[in-house]
Each structure stands twice: as structure tokens, then as C-alpha cells.
């Protein structure tokens, strides 16, 4: 992980010119001014890189030295996660997938156990729409590589064969750290969830070291806690077509905002776009949903849910969100129609009033 840039800003709490000559009154003035200014805390910003994404960490209210030390710890964690969780670069996850494909059991490194366990629960809660066992299908579609895929879609027979195997997270057992799958087609890929999980671990580290105000922003998917200059953090929701910011949301206490979209990565062939979020039921990419934004207390669940709701689409997003315990969700379909629950509508402020339809759901 490379620190691409480091920038430190200092709170502007110095007295202005108008106070020159009044230094005898300085202690009194300071005591009057400081409460008003105390909201302007020192800001530290650091940019890291993990899972192919730039991660901006903003910390308020601790010294530069302390902030630097904490972000160094987070960077070390990110490097470890990148190595341990990568689905196609050599490492522990690739070893697991190789063992499964041979029908062998394998000892799992401790850092992977909680991610396997939580993603299996989320698989169940999403009715299998979030399914990190679809690594084989992602590979067929060319999404397990660093460069964007091109050329025609995979052979229909290969997809059919994958559907016959129907790899699923509940075909994995882990006993005393040893993993086995009854289905050799199971290939783990945590691409839909790892970013959220990593953001949560970074937030845990920040809190453990006494930070009270921070944002960890992984390419527009983020978790924030505390405040910015005495007010709640206000964060942007990425525009579905990648055109900057669609809307803004105020963070209440400690929350994550995650957006999944088909504009991020896709394969294009003869004018047809095949986005990177796949429907495990059909084996093909979801084409009629542009984006889903979820607000939730933690990043891992928000990340998994945003992906699952893209697969669920306009007809099923509400049922799946409810089942996953999501309280705020917004879906934009291919025609620009915006679907959301009433609580989400109260929180989201559009940059420009959406010209398309708004479909308000029942409460979540
Ligand atoms: P996200 O941007 O969080 O929605 O994650 C998208 C990534 O998740 C894709 O690039 C794939 O690696 C992976 N993925 C695609 N479809 C699914 C799915 N239905 N369940 C789980 N992971 C998926
Ligand atoms: Mg996701």
C-alpha cells in the first residue's frame, strides 16, 4: 500500500488582526472565544490504496503525530487484507479455492474466518443474491482480473454448467479452522463485501486509539463517525453514471453509505454492456439497475446489501432489504426511476431534482 499523498490542515482558531493591541485582554478574550472556536478541530487527511481503490482517511481532533501513527496501523492492516483476501493473486484465498476445486479440506488462516462466517450469514439473509461463492462465474465473465474484460460474453454452455453446480455459501463447512466444501464449484470472491469489511476494521482501529471524529472513504463508499466542525458529516452519494455527486446525506452518529452500480466495471461487446454484478440465479449480469445506495450502521453489511439489492432489482429490493435488516435504501433503475423507502427520502438531498419518476415504497 502506498501513501499517495499526505496533507494536514490546521483549525483556524488564531485571533484576527482586529485584536492587535488588546493583548492585555488576551486571556479574557481567549476564554470567550475558545468555546466558540473549539468546534474547529485539527484535520488530518491521508490517502491509502487497497483492493484497487484509493481510500481517503480524514481524522479530526487528534494531533498530527497521533493521526499519522493510526493511519500507519490501518495501512498495515489494509496490506494484510489485500494479500489474504485477493481472489486471483496468489495468497490464502487462492489456496482455499484451489483446495475446494480438488475436493480437499484446508486449514483457514484466522483472519479469513470471520469474513467467511459473516458473508455466509449475509448470503442467507439476502436469499442467496449476495453470493461470494460465485468466483467461478466471475472468472467466466472475465471479472477476476485487474484490467477490464473485453470480447464476447462467455459460452452459454459454460454458464449452464455453472448453474447446474450452483455454488453456494451454505455448501461450506468450517470445523476447528478447517474448511471443506461439498461442491467443488464453490470459488470464494469477496469483491462485493471486502471493502466494507476493511472500512469497518479501519474504523475500529480509529476508535480504539481514541479518535472521536473521522471518515474512511473508499472511492465514495464510506463510514463516518463523530462530527465535522460541530455539525454532522455530510457526504456525497456517487452519481449512477459516474458523473460526480447525485445527492448528499447527513451522517447520524456512526454510519456507512455504500453504493453499488453497474457503471463501475463492465464488459462491452458490440454495443452491449455486461456489468460486473451478476445474478447467481441466471448466471448473467444485472442490466436493468443503474445503482443502489444503502445507509447502515456498519460497512460490511452495507456493502453486501448494496450488491444484493442491485441483483434484487425494482421488484424485490424492498423484501430483500427488510430481510437484511436495512433501514435506508435507494435504487435507480436503467430508466432513471428512483425507488426508495420513506425514511431514506427524508435523509437524501438531491443535487438536482431528479427529472425521472420517484417511487416511494412502504416503510422498511
Ligand atoms: P460491489 O461494487 O460492492 O457491488 O461489488 C461488486 C463485485 O462483487 C463484483 O466486481 C464481483 O467481484 C462481486 N459480485 C458480483 N455479483 C455478485 C453477487 N451476486 N454476489 C456476490 N458478489 C458479487
Ligand atoms: Mg457491495
Image: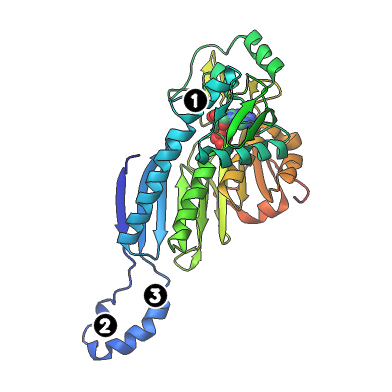
Residue 37's label in the rendered image is 3
Q: Which mark is residue 19?
A: 2
Name which quarter of the figure residue 23 lies in: bottom left
Report the Cα–Cα distance between label 2 and label 1: 65 Å
Extreme residue toward the front, this view: 176
Q: CA distance from mark 3 to mark 1?
A: 52 Å
Quadrant that contains the N terminus:
top left
User: Against 30, is 54 above or below?
Assistant: above
Circle 1 — which element?
helix
Pinpoint residue 334: horizontal percent, then vertical percent: 64, 31
Comes first in the chain, label 2 or label 1: 2
Sequence-earlier tag: 3 or 1: 3
Q: Where is 232 relative to 311, above or below?
A: below
Q: CA distance from mark 2 to mark 3?
A: 15 Å
Q: Residue furthest left?
A: 21
In this figure, which colouring scheme has been used for the structure?
A: rainbow
Residue bearing the label numbered 1: 94
At label 1, counting other C-alpha atoms closer than 10 Å, the crowd grade (few under 14, some 14-19, many 20 or more) is: some
Amino acid at each position: 500500500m502506498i501513501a499517495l499523498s499526505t496533507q494536514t490542515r490546521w483549525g483556524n482558531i488564531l485571533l484576527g488582526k482586529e485584536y492587535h493591541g488588546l493583548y492585555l485582554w488576551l486571556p479574557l478574550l481567549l476564554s470567550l472565544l475558545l468555546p466558540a472556536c473549539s468546534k474547529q478541530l485539527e484535520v488530518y487527511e491521508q490517502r491509502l490504496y487497497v483492493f484497487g481503490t484509493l481510500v481517503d482517511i480524514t481524522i479530526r481532533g487528534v494531533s498530527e503525530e497521533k493521526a499519522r501513527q493510526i493511519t500507519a496501523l490501518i495501512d498495515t492492516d489494509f496490506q494484510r487484507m489485500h494479500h489474504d483476501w485477493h481472489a486471483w493473486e496468489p495468497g490464502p484465498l487462492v489456496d482455499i479455492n484451489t483446495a475446494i476445486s480438488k475436493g480437499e479440506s484446508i486449514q483457514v488462516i484466522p483472519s479469513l474466518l470471520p469474513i467467511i462466517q459473516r458473508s455466509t450469514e449475509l448470503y442467507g439473509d439476502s436469499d442467496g443474491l449476495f453470493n461470494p461463492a460465485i468466483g467461478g462465474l466471475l472468472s467466466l465473465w472475465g471479472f477476476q482480473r485487474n484490467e477490464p474484460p473485453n470480447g464476447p460474453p462467455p459460452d452459454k454452455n459454460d454458464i449452464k454448467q455453472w448453474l447446474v453446480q450452483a455454488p453456494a455459501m451454505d455448501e461450506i463447512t468450517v470445523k476447528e479452522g478447517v474448511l471443506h466444501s461439498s461442491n467443488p464449484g464453490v470459488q470464494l470472491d469477496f469483491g462485493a463485501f471486502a471493502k466494507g469489511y476493511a472500512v469497518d476494521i479501519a474504523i475500529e482501529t480509529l476508535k480504539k486509539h481514541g479518535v472521536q471524529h473521522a471518515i474512511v472513504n473508499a472511492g465514495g463508499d464510506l463510514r463516518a463517525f463523530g462530527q465535522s466542525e460541530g455539525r454532522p458529516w455530510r457526504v456525497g452519494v456517487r452519481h449512477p453514471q459516474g458523473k460526480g455527486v447525485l445527492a448528499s446525506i447527513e451522517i447520524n452518529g456512526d454510519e456507512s453509505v455504500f453504493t453499488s452500480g453497474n457503471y463501475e466495471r463492465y464488459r462491452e461487446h458490440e454495443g452491449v454492456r455486461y456489468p460486473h454484478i451478476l445474478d447467481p440465479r441466471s448466471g448473467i449480469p444485472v442490466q436493468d439497475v443503474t445503482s443502489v445506495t444503502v445507509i447502515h450502521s456498519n460497512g460490511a453489511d452495507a456493502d453486501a446489501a448494496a450488491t444484493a439489492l442491485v441483483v434484487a432489482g425494482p421488484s424485490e429490493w424492498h423484501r430483500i432489504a427488510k430481510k437484511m435488516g436495512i433501514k435506508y435504501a435507494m435504487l435507480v433503475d436503467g430508466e432513471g426511476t428512483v425507488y426508495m423507502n420513506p425514511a431514506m427520502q427524508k435523509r437524501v438531498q438531491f443535487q438536482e431534482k431528479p427529472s425521472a419518476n420517484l417511487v416511494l415504497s412502504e416503510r422498511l
